[in-house]
Amino acid sequence: MISRTLIRIKAFKELYSRITTGSTDIKAAENELMQAFAQTQRLYGLIALLPSALAMVAEDKVATQNRKFNPDQDKIDLNTKFASNTLSSLTRADSVFQNWCSNQAISWMDFETSLKSIYSSMISKDYFNDFLKAENPGMKEAVNLFRHVYSEELSGNEMFEDALESSNIWWAEDLEYVISKVLDNLGAIAASGHVTVPQLFEDSEDEQFARKLTSTVMLDFDDLVETISSYMSNWEIGRVVQSDMLLVAMGLAEAQTFSSIPFKVTINEYVEISKYYSTPKSYSFVNGLLNKILKDMAAQGKIHKDPRGMIGGLD
């Protein structure tokens, strides 16, 4: 579930926190990084639980109408039809998934205001009316409906993002990534009849990559900075933005430590991170310096790559 890109981003955040505070506890850093990854998995569970939660909102609305002296039958029909959609029914009936969410203390109860807002917005949209017009909507129609819900109601929802941030410090920034993962898996969920929460890492290599990258940068940070400084003849080391220095150090550590990762991949990944987590001009600095250092060290035989790691070469 956790991509290499997300590993690098979370490692960067953890390392930045450790380096700026002078912490040298590598084991604690690794443990906190693993906890951050586990929180991304928990957020996946919450987002995958949305069809179930929205169905319960619809059922509450039906119950409210039925308690009225003159209930609105159109509203009852609308909410009943949505509440019984096949994807929501599948999610609610999946005892393994529901138990996993319960054991992880995952629930939409803490996001009730956002949930009701999502529902109100959803039922006003054309895609929802298209769902209602279907005579006997099945799984195909339900999946299409929720693709719209995730893309149009959840993605970019500032109210929900604020609620997430208040509830869990790890969740808000992972929301768009997790939504994309749930969207990718909707077809598989419909086909299998089960909501499967992806494993934390695709394989053991990804976990080893996360741990090794973090520990290497922490252990060798002073040496990495010294190497970087030797290539900065026109720069004063004290004037370099600390986040930029860390990104270059991470790129250098990755290039030296992981022989199967191409130089191009390493450079592009840290340049992209710099665009979001550093200054507006950082990407140019990180790109230029990493290219210069890695090209020179490779030419001197100080960095060795296996055949996979040579793909793409260097500029």
Image (cartoon, grey):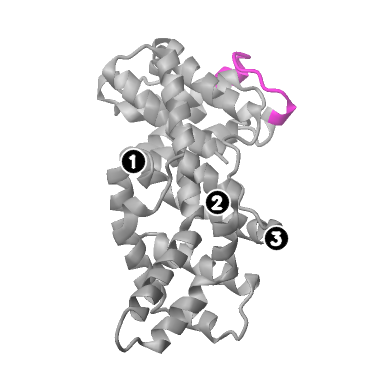
Residue on which the image places disc 2? 181
Q: Do the residues labelled 3 and 1 touch (CB within 8 Å)?
A: no
10 Å neighbourhood of mark 1: few (<14), some, or many (≥20)? few
Q: How far apart are marks 3 and 2 (CA)?
A: 16 Å
Q: Distance between the residues labelled 3 and 1?
A: 32 Å
Q: Which residue is drawn at 67% across and 26% down?
A: 260
Residue on which the image places disc 1? 168
Q: Quadrant of residue 124?
A: bottom left
Q: Position of residue 171 (x, y in %)?
A: 38, 43
- Note whether residue 170 is visible: yes
Comparing labels 3 and 2, the label whose residue is closer to the camera: 3
Q: Which residue is drawn at 29% across and 58% down?
A: 159
Q: Where is residue 219 in the image (x, y as percent from the top left)?
A: 45, 11
Q: What kind of element bears circle 1? A: loop
Numbered range of the magenta stretch: 295-308
Q: Where is residue 78 in the image (x, y as percent from the top left)?
A: 45, 81
Q: Which residue is more in the foreground, 296 or 55?
A: 55
